[in-house]
Amino acid sequence: MGANNGKQYGSEDSDLSMRTLSTPSPALIFPPNSPGFQNGRGSSTSSSSVTGETVAMVHSPPPTRLTHPLIRLASKHQKEQANIDRLPDHAMIQIFSFLPTNQLCRCARVCRRWYNLAWDPRLWRTIRLTGETINVDRALKVLTRRLCQDTPNVCLMLETVIVSGCRRLTDRGLYTIAQCCPELRRLEVSGCYNISNEAVFDVVSLCPNLEHLDVSGCSKVTCISLTREASIKLSPLHGKQISIRYLDMTDCFVLEDEGLHTIAAHCTQLTHLYLRRCVRITDEGLRYLMIYCTSIKELSVSDCRFVSDFGMREIAKLESRLRYLSIAHCGRITDVGIRYIAKYCSKLRYLNARGCEGITDHGVEYLAKNCTKLKSLDIGKCPLVSDTGLEFLALNCFNLKRLSLKSCESITGQGLQIVAANCFDLQMLNVQDCEVSVDALRFVKRHCKRCIIEHTNPAFF
């Protein structure tokens, strides 16, 4: 039965190969002068020899059998050892599913059978390209053209595109994706600083199922909306909403409150939002956010220096829905802001308040008594937190697994011992640059056997 199935599958592939005109070359992925491109079959004479630039080439399907001189000279014994050719098609496809895009293109050039298997639609739900020198605009154009071969101008199987770190990606490349991939659900373009609002508009307006968008490091992106004009006066077109749930805008330095207002008005289904180092965001922007996006579970405003206790009051409106909050290095946040979060967000699991120097033992006490399910807490570089605050944590947060106290000058070994005696599930403890004794560290290790201790005490090992 297995042999018959394999024979039938091969017949279908033969028909597919008759329809197939070309396959992208590995030159889509590697520059011609790179070692990865020059080795093996990547050095085919059909590839371009342009120096210093990754180019997109097109090749016809390879012959049924390899014609390389080294292959022709191989002994019969060596040929018999090529057991991979004995695997059925479904097993080969499973193996190919673990390969990145560039390696899959290489496999397509081995022989006709591999060509047909490598272009199985099940293997092309994701495109992943990386590299600073890659001509990613052209690569995306050639790949999507090939994937649209059976459904002209539309690539229905592609759901994920990851081109993070491809600095040569421009709006043209994203426009190609937007036009050809209406079923796109996940797009990651972090570090592609040539992307603008125009390209993001194309993607969100033409890909209605997009749920995950990572534009971190795209410093030109200031807005995400269904209108080309980034204005808060414009409502979503015909009442439409963007279905994005996960949005990472880390290091989008020029994002302001007005842009955040527009994002919130169009992306009301957000559950995960990361605004790390969006330094122009203020409490007013957070107020807009809480008006429209009431389902947020994870929020990061780390290094947003204008966010204060008033912003914490707005965030607290998320109440029990909020599980993750990062406010690291927000110097204007004090115990008052922590009290807002602790009072209303009782199901908080993760809090990063590193560098919030206005937080004291009183804030930690209120947090520990109200957020008893807390699993991870970072209060490093909070010089006003002492052993008293640690005692409140130890007596209330028994499920604590990760605790960072780095550079907390008022912490001593006594506070650590109280934590270790009550929080048996502790898995990570950071006490770097803290004045704690070797005996205290050994006590922690005895009581929390799975705990990894990060320290700067050379006498403890």
Image (spheres, rainbow, N blue to C red):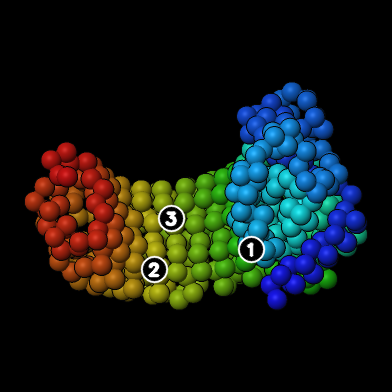
Q: Position of residue 219 (x, y in %)?
A: 64, 42
Left or right, 112 with reference to 454: right
The image quarter in which residue 373 lies? bottom left
Q: Secondary structure at mark 1?
A: helix
Residue ID for mark 1 = 91
Q: Residues within 10 Å of mark 3 (few under 14, many from 20)?
A: many
Are the residues at dot 3 and dot 2 in contact (C-beta closer than 8 Å)?
no
Q: Is residue 257 above or below residue 89?
A: above
Q: Which residue is at the front of the view, 439 or 316?
A: 439
Residue ID for mark 2 = 349
- At 73% from the left and 45% from the top, the residue drawn is 110
The image quarter in which residue 444 lies? bottom left
Q: Secondary structure at mark 3?
A: loop
Instruction: Give how far apart the Cα atoms at labels 1 and 3 are.
Output: 48 Å
Residue located farthest toward the left when viewing the structure as drawn: 439
The N terminus appears in which quarter of the rendering?
bottom right
Q: Which residue is at the front of the view, 267 or 340?
A: 267
- At 50% from the left and 72% from the top, the residue drawn is 318
Q: Report the label total.
A: 3
Which of disc 3 and disc 1 is earlier in sequence? 1
Q: Is residue 307 above or below residue 270?
A: above
Q: Residues within 10 Å of mark 2 (few under 14, many from 20)?
A: some
> Which mark lies nearer to you, 1 or 3?
1
Residue ID for mark 3 = 327
Task: Look at label 1 and name its amino acid.
Answer: Ala
Q: Is residue 249 above or below residue 346?
A: above
